[in-house]
């Protein structure tokens, strides 16, 4: 298969195209022919180094969000059928630890992330557990599907599961702010909220340290809620809502899955020259 990898950390020029033997699915796994994968900031961060995720190794194949077709299955897999059009849940929990047994698998100490510390979608083929693929509705294209996993699961978890999203405030200030940029808006977001408002945060693109007025926060009962990893069950709930609620995701551009395409896509993402999702397609 063809894949885009990097053997060292650095700028976009470390991305290179290679030809590797096709991976083979093991027990409980399926082989997915990648039809589209979308870019995320983790792709850039881990390429530049140092990597964020434990278990990361070089050479690395990025690409967290994968949509494609099941072309082979390992022993014990009965569904989905070969030829199924699927979307991959990129968070691969172990299913056996205490966290997994009680449904908090986002904290699984052995979690693997497709495109993070498990080979991802910057390739023609990838192997994932059959339990982590979801069959696409007929009306959903591979391109649209590949935009969904990371951004929508992050938004769903922060807004719905952690933030308990509600409607209208009667002019008293907002019930909740969902912040994914960090210190640039942290303090001003607090002042925009009503008493006992909820500030849910999950990102640090403008820095890793935020300051705010402590007396204001405790006087008005402002709740600071870190948005932790989503769970396996939540991913299914998010997809069920996405399929039926009429949501769409803006696609900025589509690049070929080759050395030049991957480099240009990551260069644009790194520079912030993008509105919506960018895709790579074999």
Image (cartoon, rainbow, N blue to C red):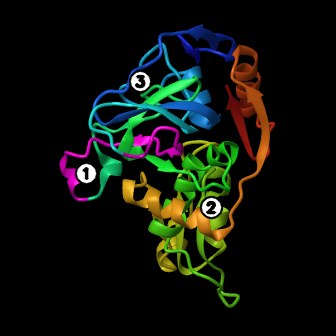
Tell which circle, 2 or 1, labels the residue nearer the N-terminal end.
1
Q: Nearer the viewer, residue 229 or 185?
A: 229
Q: Secondary structure at mark 3?
A: loop
Residue bounds of the magenta highlight: 79-102
Mark 3 vs mark 2: in front: 3
Residue 106 image offset from top left, x and y in percent: 36, 50
Q: Which mark is residue 187?
A: 2
Q: Which residue is mark 1?
A: 100
Looking at the image, is 230 positioned above or below residue 65? Answer: below
Magenta span contains residue 201: no
Looking at the image, is 2 positioned above or below residue 244? Answer: above
Looking at the image, is 184 positioned above or below residue 173? Answer: above
Which corner quadrant of the image does residue 123 belong to?
top right
Question: Image check: 19 left or right of 144?
Answer: left
Tell whether label 1 touches label 2 (CB within 8 Å).
no
Question: Image check: 259 left or right of 57?
Answer: right
Q: Nearer the viewer, residue 241 or 189?
A: 241
Residue depicted at x 69% and y 23% = 257
Residue depicted at x 75% and y 21% = 261
Give me the C-alpha separation between circle 2 and circle 1. 35 Å
Tell me if mark 2 has few (under 14), some (14-19) or many (20+) residues whose alpha carbon lies within 10 angstroms of its own.
some
Residue 36 image offset from top left, x and y in percent: 64, 35
Give me the C-alpha separation between circle 3 and circle 2. 34 Å
Tell me if mark 3 has few (under 14), some (14-19) or many (20+) residues whose alpha carbon lies within 10 angstroms of its own.
some
Q: Nearer the viewer, residue 185 or 114?
A: 114
Residue depicted at x 75% and y 47% = 276
Question: Image check: 174 left or right of 135?
Answer: right
């Amino acid at each position: 298969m063809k894949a885009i990898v990097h053997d060292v950390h650095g700028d976009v020029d470390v991305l290179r195209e290679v030809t590797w033997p096709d991976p083979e699915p093991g027990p409980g796994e399926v082989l997915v022919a990648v039809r589209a994968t979308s870019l995320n900031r983790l792709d850039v961060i881990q390429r530049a180094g140092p990597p964020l995720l434990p278990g990361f190794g070089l050479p690395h194949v990025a690409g967290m969000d994968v949509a494609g077709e099941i072309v082979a299955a390992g022993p014990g897999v009965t569904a989905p059928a070969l030829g199924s059009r699927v979307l991959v849940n990129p968070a691969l929990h172990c299913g056996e630890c205490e966290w997994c047994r009680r449904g908090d698998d986002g904290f699984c100490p052995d979690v693997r992330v497709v495109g993070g510390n498990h080979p991802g979608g910057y390739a023609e083929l990838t192997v994932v557990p059959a339990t982590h693929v979801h069959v696409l509705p007929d009306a959903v294209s591979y391109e649209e599907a590949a935009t969904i996993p990371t951004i929508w699961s992050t938004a769903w978890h922060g807004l719905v599961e952690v933030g308990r999203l509600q409607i209208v405030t009667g002019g008293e200030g907002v019930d909740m702010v969902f912040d994914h940029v960090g210190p640039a808006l942290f303090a001003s977001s607090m002042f925009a909220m009503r008493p006992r408002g909820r500030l849910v945060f999950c990102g640090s693109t403008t820095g890793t340290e935020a300051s705010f007025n402590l007396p204001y926060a405790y006087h008005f009962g402002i709740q600071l809620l870190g948005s932790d990893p989503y769970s396996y069950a939540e991913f299914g709930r998010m997809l069920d809502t996405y399929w039926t609620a009429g949501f769409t995701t803006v696609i900025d551009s589509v690049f070929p899955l080759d050395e030049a395409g991957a480099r240009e896509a990551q260069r644009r993402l790194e520079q912030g020259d993008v509105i919506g999702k960018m895709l790579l397609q074999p």
